[in-house]
Image (cartoon, rainbow, N blue to C red):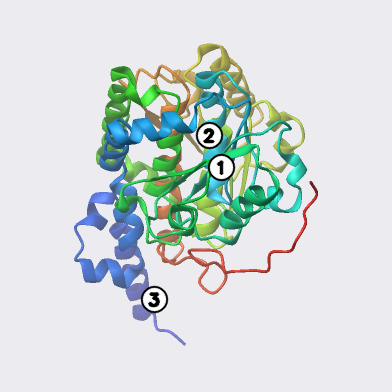
């Protein structure tokens, strides 16, 4: 039986561990060997490098050779664009799709790669452009979908956006007709199991298609976004860490339009990094009322990604005020620019993207996702986990090879 002094000593160790996760700066200052020992070195580096890598991606999209490549992929203008990927990659597609549709003026859909493998008939008729989104480009679905379409759907051309210059999507189809690959900065090829900087850079590159990245306005927007997120890292990571240490085992993430993709990605990060100890749900603000609200209680963390569009935000505020009246949710994390005072409680954390001046919905989604990454990262550490390798023995960085069966419903 442990003595009273042993119990006090254990409490002291626990308090010291708690202090260690008070801020990103504290964790960054630890020696590299200590970071590796605690299992967070890669994830922390990859989260923190995002403002710098976004500016590198924005510059890449403006390089003459890349501009010509992307313009060729979109010429002539396709009748349809389908964004595809698996796991986080399809959530990236969901972030990109609404804004890219406005930019191109053609229908843009996000369809999971697994769906295209089993139900090829989900593709819109008449052909178009398939944009494959992938960190490694080596998952079974990534190459499987391209192989299937090259063999059976000649009306579709292909653009791969990947973080891995050595992956199948970047190398295997180099000589294929109507196929192009955009490879992002090597730093974005995250080494951690969970996707962080790879995800946001894939979203950014997809959002810059259609000539947007060529404009000074878009480039300046990326720079402002990087500054806003760096401010969050520098001044609010401690508040997010405190939220992550609270007693909750359920979290709901809310977003409208493309922000639903950001909410799904953030929910997945929390689920992955806690090994399922925190049950998560992603929903639209308006959709929450249609059944999912019944799962919320007084101990649910609510993370709300607020639209820059005032008309959309009015609906979002109404839902948040309703949750207050019904006393649903323990605390909230609210992300957006110029958030109204009355929707935030005394214990809530408001990440105000002051100065972002978003001209569209796409760029704020990157900040939304980063806040979700930071919350999941700190929650993992608070539960004694290792962010670089959560769910060890269950998940792998690249999905293991599995049998690809002939057919699929055309």
User: Element type at marker 3?
Assistant: helix
Would residue 211 appear left or right of 323 to someone viewing this image? left
Marks counted in the figure total 3
Image coords of residue 147 (percent x, y): 62, 54
Secondary structure of the residue carrying numbered label 2: helix
The Cα atoms of the two marked residues, 2 and 3, are separated by: 48 Å
User: Which image quarter: residue 381?
Assistant: bottom left
State the image coordinates of residue 312 (x, y, percent, origin top left).
57, 17
Identify which residue is drawn at 34% across, 49% down: 47
- Establish if 97 lies above or below 141: above
Say above or below: 223 vs 175.
Answer: above
Question: Circle 1: is it few (<14), some (14-19), or many (20+) Cα within 10 Å?
Answer: many
Q: Is residue 101 left or right of residue 369?
A: right
Image height check: is 337 above or below 238? above
Q: CA distance from mark 2 to mark 1?
A: 6 Å
- Front position among marks 2 and 3: 2
**Where is residue 40 drawn, in percent x and y?**
34, 62
Q: Circles 2 and 1: CB distance less than 8 Å?
A: yes
Residue at label 2?
95
Work out whether 322 lies above or below 389: above
Residue 91's disc number: 1
The mark nearer the N terminus, 1 or 3, is: 3
Q: Which mark is residue 7?
A: 3
Residue at 59% of width from left, 28% of height from top?
Answer: 324
Q: Sequence-wise, which precedes: disc 2 or disc 3?
A: 3
Comparing 409 with 354, the one in front is: 409
Local packing at callout 2 (Cα closer than 10 Å; few below 14, some 14-19, many 20+) is many
Whether residue 364 is visible = no
């Amino acid at each position: 039986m442990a003595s009273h002094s042993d119990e006090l000593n254990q409490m002291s160790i626990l308090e010291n561990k708690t202090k260690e996760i008070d801020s990103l700066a504290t964790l960054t200052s630890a020696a590299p060997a200590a970071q590796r020992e605690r299992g967070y070195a890669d994830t922390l580096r990859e989260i923190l490098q995002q403002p710098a890598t976004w500016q590198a991606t924005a510059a890449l999209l403006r390089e003459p050779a890349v501009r010509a490549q992307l313009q060729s992929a979109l010429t002539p203008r396709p009748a349809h664009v389908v964004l595809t990927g698996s796991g986080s990659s399809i959530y990236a597609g969901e972030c990109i799709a609404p804004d890219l549709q406005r930019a191109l003026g053609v229908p843009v859909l996000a369809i999971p790669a697994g769906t295209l493998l089993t139900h090829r008939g989900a593709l819109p008729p008449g052909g178009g452009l398939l944009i494959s989104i992938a960190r490694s480009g080596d998952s079974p679905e990534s190459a499987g979908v391209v192989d299937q379409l090259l063999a059976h759907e000649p009306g579709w051309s292909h653009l791969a956006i990947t973080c891995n210059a050595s992956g199948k999507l970047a190398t295997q189809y180099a000589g294929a007709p109507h196929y192009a690959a955009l490879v992002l900065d090597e730093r974005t090829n995250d080494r951690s199991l969970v996707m962080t900087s790879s995800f946001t850079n894939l979203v950014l590159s997809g959002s810059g298609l259609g000539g947007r990245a060529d404009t000074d306005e878009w480039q300046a927007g990326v720079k402002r976004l990087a500054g806003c997120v760096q401010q969050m890292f520098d001044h609010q990571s401690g508040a997010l860490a405190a939220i992550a240490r609270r007693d909750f085992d359920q979290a709901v993430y809310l977003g409208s339009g493309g922000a639903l993709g950001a909410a799904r990605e953030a929910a997945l990060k929390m689920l992955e990094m806690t090994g399922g100890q925190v049950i998560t749900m992603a929903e639209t603000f308006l959709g929450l009322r249609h059944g999912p609200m019944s799962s919320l209680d007084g101990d649910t963390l609510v993370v709300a990604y607020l639209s820059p569009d005032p008309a959309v935000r009015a609906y979002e505020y109404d839902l948040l005020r309703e949750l207050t009246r019904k006393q649903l949710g323990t605390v909230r994390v609210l992300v957006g620019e110029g958030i109204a005072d009355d929707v935030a409680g005394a214990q809530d954390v408001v990440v105000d993207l002051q100065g972002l001046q978003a001209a569209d919905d796409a760029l704020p989604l990157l900040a939304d996702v980063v806040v979700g990454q930071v919350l999941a990262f700190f929650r993992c550490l608070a539960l004694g986990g290792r962010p670089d390798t959560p769910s060890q023995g269950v998940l792998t960085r690249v999905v293991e090879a599995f049998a690809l069966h002939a057919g699929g419903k055309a």
